[in-house]
Image (tube, grey):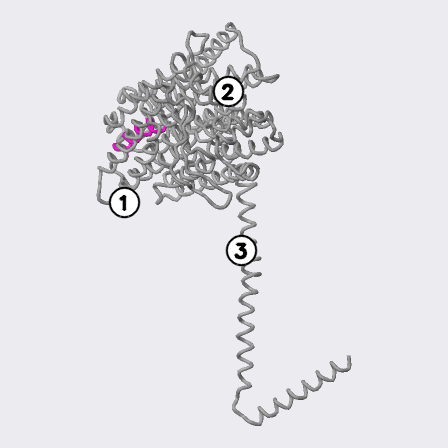
Amino acid sequence: MTNLVWLVPLFPFIGFLVTGLGRNHLGKASGWIASTAILASFVVSLLIFFEIKSGTSASPVIVHLFDFLNIGNMNIPFDFQVDALSSIFLLVITGIGFLIHLYSISYMSHDEGFGKFFSYLNLFVFSMLILVLGANYLIMFIGWEGVGLCSYLLIGFWYKNVAYTVAAQKAFVMNRIGDLGFLVGIFLLFSKFGNLDYLTLQSAFGAGTIDATFVTSVALCFFIGATGKSAQIPLFTWLPDAMAGPTPVSALIHAATMVTAGVYMITRSNFIFSLSEQAQQVILVIGLATALVAATIATRQNDIKKVLAYSTVSQLGFMFMALGVGAYTAAVFHVITHAFFKALLFLGSGSVIHAVGGEQDIRNMGGLRGKMKITYGTFLIGCIAIAGIPPLSGFFSKDEIMMHVFNHGVYGKVFWVLGMLAALMTAYYMFRLLFITFFGEFRGTNHQREHLHESPLLMTMPLMVLAFLSIVGGLIGIPHVLGGGHHLDAFIRPLLIKVSVDHELSHQTEILLMVIAIGIALAGILMAWFGFKKYDAKSTSKGLASFFENKWYIDELYQAIIVTPVKQVSLFFENIIEKSGIDAFVNGVGKFIQFSSNRLKLLQNGLVGGYLFLMVIGVIILFIIQVWVNKF
């Protein structure tokens, strides 16, 4: 079945072409065609996964499609690599993607761009599949740029709203900054090895003869690329603004596709990162800082989607903490569980927004649990999962990350304490969101109150499936201390050249850390309960709370130190260098020629005497020149 892996991206690509070309003629059929394409990809992905899992294809399988570049000594094939890591991501992308497509059929049913929307969604999934299937970095980069383009199209989907187009431009530009770092890393690899294939490079790095400075340089360049796609400090501010797109887009970007690209890339490149302690330390510190900063901001946001957006940034910080300590399996585990509960939470928020007529401010909600029982129940499950309460999935993946952080080097325990502070805030802001939105009295308008209703089945069914996955998803990674076999670790471990940790923790320590983690999560929930069970929507933020509500003024800082100076320099070049300099010179030459020709043409006056006079003058000038030359 692995030899038919090309079918996985082919189906959504066909869906993109059909729905795109027929967007004005297919009507609502566009949604079903696009969803069927993703479902077909999921079925093939499932068959490939079971083949890999059964051991019939234990080693990576390279599927050659055609020669992409063959110029002189440069030969880069368009190959797919099928192994444990890619098969897992195929399931996540197509499985969650299908549920989001299904949800979108109902959510976008009244939108005038219905067909175009599904065309973009299919192209988005196609690009992400190319990214995870590529057997070399150039093919990965093609998919990498593809998801960047699709994010721009989908974030700015409602382009008539200028603010949304600005958000799309912001996402595109900030991703291009990170992409430049990734591209430089690819150039460094090719200049040294003349090859970009994962397996070939893994053998080269495994030989242990590569200069440490070169390894760190490549790793840091790749990490810069990851900070853009996976929204880490300093390139994270685009992700909350990506909420400008329709809610299914938010779920697709934040849960299963684009933001996980950086985690996948670093895990795939573990043979590079594991050889550079300096790069891993940078990843650990940036991941921790991102988790903390985003969590503090999420505690004071009032837009239901913005809370979830900053939550995504914070959870990505946890994943990068895992990558920074070499716990690649833990990072992938959290990618999987996060895909379940974050897709659930975003689609749940879309259900709420649908019910209250497009309102996104939670201060104007409240009391929805009685009217929206399925949405409330599934949203509650998502909140419990992300808070890290057992036996839901988020507990197992986040706990494994923090175990590895605790056991990492001299400062591991300090990083663990700070990470648990971010976990405390996670439980707090998620249940703050839950209590304000679903508890108390409804604070919206009478018109909204009269039209409150549960979402249709096409929207609630994906919620129920994702809620189920959020409950049982952790079963693939139950640790040995709890009697599990950690099936995910056993599945992925053969692909890793170096497995974290410095030394094994005792079972007593692991149990103690789990108990502390559960206690911290419960403390965050209780803080939210006592703080918001009687919510006052008129209360204002002051001091540190206002600082967090204004997102640390990071956007304003970027505006002041980057955007404004760049604009001023651009205006200087436009007005002074270009208009007054280059344009003035070019136009001046033209004006001088025109002026000179207007004067010279006066000599052509038709008077023979005048012409004879000029001839005499010319002869005299030539005579003088000749005398001058002979003299010297």
| Residue beneath disc 2 | 327
Image coords of residue 44 (percent x, y): 31, 28
- Secondary element at tag 3: helix
Q: Earlier in the sequence, mark 3 or mark 2?
A: 2
- Secondary element at tag 2: loop
- Secondary element at tag 1: helix
Front residue of 496 and 386: 496
Query: How many other residues sit within 10 Å of disc 2, few (<14), some (14-19) or many (≥20)?
Result: many
Q: Earlier in the sequence, mark 1 or mark 2?
A: 1
**Residue span colored magenta:** 93-107
Query: How many other residues sit within 10 Å of disc 3, few (<14), some (14-19) or many (≥20)?
Result: some
Q: Amino acid at mark 1?
A: Leu
| Residue beneath disc 3 | 574
Q: Is residue 97 magenta?
A: yes
In the picture, measured across the screen, residue 495 lies left or right of residue 112, that is right
Q: CA distance from mark 1 to mark 2?
A: 45 Å
Q: Amino acid at mark 3?
A: Glu
Q: Quadrant of residue 286?
A: top right
Seen in the picture, residue 178 relative to 612 is either above or below; the reply is above
Seen in the picture, residue 158 relative to 284 is either above or below; the reply is below
* Residue 23 shows up from this direction: yes
Which residue sits at x=56%, y=32%?
Answer: 220
Image coords of residue 113 (percent x, y): 28, 42
In the picture, measured across the screen, residue 503 lies left or right of residue 175, that is right
Q: CA distance from mark 3 to mark 2?
A: 50 Å
In the picture, measured across the screen, residue 302 lies left or right of residue 603, that is left
| Residue beneath disc 1 | 21
